[in-house]
Amino acid sequence: MKRFLTGAVCAALMSVTAPAQVFAATGGIHDACRQSGRSEATPQRCSCIQQAANKSLTRSDRRKVAKWFRDPHQAQEVRMSDKRSDEALWKRYKAFGELAQAICQ
């Protein structure tokens, strides 16, 4: 009986806390989005953008892209660069932007 009650309590707690975790994606992109000062940068939208970043960018990419929120000139430098690594990053960034635009409206 004690084992049954412990299992029931754990299941109840998980059902209460799990939904909140699904919607609350945090990370560097989310933080940079929230700090951008734009009226559209709501917690929900920034969380959605972070989820899109998690799906389409590497951890290293996400750190670089988060800096672009504060200094867009860095993005322009990557875009104009002749380096293969920058070209690959830019392609991943464009895919991220398209995904975020599609799911985070």
Image (tube, rainbow, N blue to C red):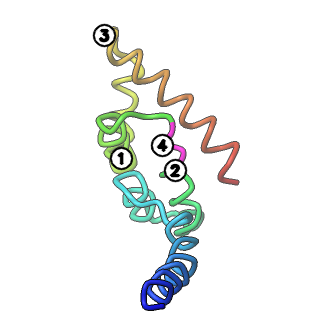
Q: Give the total of numbered labels.
A: 4
Mark nearer the N terminus (2 vs 1): 2
Most common secondary structure along the magenta stretch:
helix
Residue tagged by mark 1?
66
| Residue segment shown in magenta | 51-55
| Residue 104 drawn above or below residue 74 | below
Q: As shown in the figure, which amino acid type bears the numbered disc 3?
A: Lys
Residue tagged by mark 3?
83
Cα separation, mark 3 vs mark 4, equals 22 Å
Residue at 51 percent of width and 60 percent of height? 47
* Rendered location of residue 26, percent (x, y): 41, 60
Between label 4 and label 1, give the one nearer the viewer.
4
The crowding category of the residue bearing disc 2, from other C-alpha atoms within 10 Å (few below 14, some 14 to 19, many at least 20), is many
The crowding category of the residue bearing disc 1, from other C-alpha atoms within 10 Å (few below 14, some 14 to 19, many at least 20), is many
Q: Is mark 3 on a helix, strand or loop?
A: loop
> In the rendered structure, are the residues bearing label 2 and label 3 in contact, judged by CB atoms less than 8 Å apart?
no
Q: As shown in the figure, which amino acid type bears the numbered disc 2?
A: Gln
* Rendered location of residue 49, percent (x, y): 53, 51
Residue at 48 percent of width and 52 percent of height? 50
Residue tagged by mark 4?
53
Between label 2 and label 3, give the one nearer the viewer.
2
Q: As shown in the figure, which amino acid type bears the numbered disc 4?
A: Ala
Residue tagged by mark 2?
51
* Rendered location of residue 99, percent (x, y): 62, 38
Between label 2 and label 1, give the one nearer the viewer.
2
